[in-house]
Amino acid sequence: MKIALVVNYEKQGAAETAQKITDLLISEGAEVLMLKGEQTASIHNVSLFDSHIDLVSACDVLITVGGDGTIIHCARHAAAFNKPILGINLGRLGYVAELEANEISMLKSILSGDYDLENRLILSVSVHRENGSMQTYTAVNDAVISRGSLSRIIDLNVSIDGAPVSSYRADGILVATPTGSTAYALSAGGPVVSPNLKCIELVPICSHSLSARCVILSDKSTVEIKANSPDGKSYLTLDGQISVELSKNDRVEVKSCEQSLSMIVLKKRNFYKLASEKLREVTVNEA
């Protein structure tokens, strides 16, 4: 089995954890694939690749070491090539991660095939330009339209399945997957949604209205958003990692993607209990 290992070396203990994982996997007969870099110079008997795309396309399974951001970044590639992914948490929250660093011995279950797959909805996000061109992206957590880095009011017109449904004056609007319901959408006042549900979450961000509420949509729905800011500029942000500048007459179309994200499940956990524990952990750490 070919297992790709992507490591966020900015996390404390990442190098040591990566070494333990490669030693374990190789001793069990797996071939380990990694990205080229200075950090991999001391790790032997692994195959090295120049890019995430080359790495993921060549593997059978993708494992990440880092925080939720590392998992989400790699998950877009995993979904594109229909490869299952598992995250090992070295971050603060680890909502999406399956294992903690002290549980890496459980990776043997992947090699024996003793695991389940959880298929999660992801978003297809298309930007339709005034000149007729179009760019399409994928998002694992969410797509956000706002004025950018400054928190300023923006007017947003929203249509669902071709019918105009609402206009918002807000800091922005967010379209999230169930996986993303515990990320930015939660902070913006959206509900926690079980990640195995097939639905889309629409959340206005700091709306200048008493009636604006989060809406849960069918996974068959298509959301179209047009932004109108005073200077004609707004921004689309995908998973907090990709930023796309929008012009006045551009429109953004969001729907569920034909591909899904396959998450490897090694432990039987109650999602709501896990979410409660993670939220309590944040509260304690911030107190």
Image (cartoon, rainbow, N blue to C red):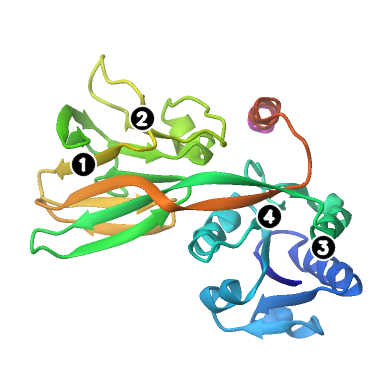
Residue at which label 1 appears: 225
> For the residue carrying disc 4, how many other residues have a C-alpha within 10 Å: few (<14), some (14-19), or many (20+)?
many
Residue at the (15%, 65%) spot, across then down: 133
- Mark 1 to mark 4 CA distance (whole Å): 33 Å
Real-space Cα separation, disc 4 to disc 3, in angstroms: 13 Å
Instruction: Nearest to the eye among marks 4 and 3: give it.
Output: 3
Dot 3 or dot 2, earlier in sequence: 3
Q: Secondary structure at mark 1?
A: strand
The disc placed on residue 111 is 3
Classify mark 2: helix, strand or loop: strand
Whether pointer 4 and pointer 3 mark residues with C-beta atoms closer than 8 Å, the reply is no
The residue mark sitting in front, 2 or 1, is 2
Say which label, 2 or 4, has the lower sequence index: 4
Q: Does residue 227 appear left or right of residue 9 in this picture?
A: left
State which quadrant residue 175 falls in. top left
Tell me the SS state at disc 3: helix
1 or 4: tag closer to the N-terminus: 4
Quadrant occupied by the N terminus: bottom right
Q: Nearer the viewer, residue 217 or 237?
A: 217
Q: Position of residue 110 (x, y in %)?
A: 79, 58
Work out whether mark 4 precedes mark 3 in sequence or the reverse, and give the earlier one.
Answer: 4
Q: Which residue is located at x 27 percent, y 26 percent?
A: 207
The reply to whether the magenta stretch includes residue 283 is: yes
Question: Counting residues from the N terminus, which is met first, the one under dot 2 or under dot 1?
Answer: 2
Residue 217's tag is: 2
| 190 up-or-down from 79: above or below | above
Mark 1 vs 3, N-terminal side: 3
Q: Amino acid at mark 2?
A: Leu
Instruction: Look at the image and say whether residue 284 sits in the magenta stretch.
Output: yes
Q: Which residues are magenta?
A: 281-286
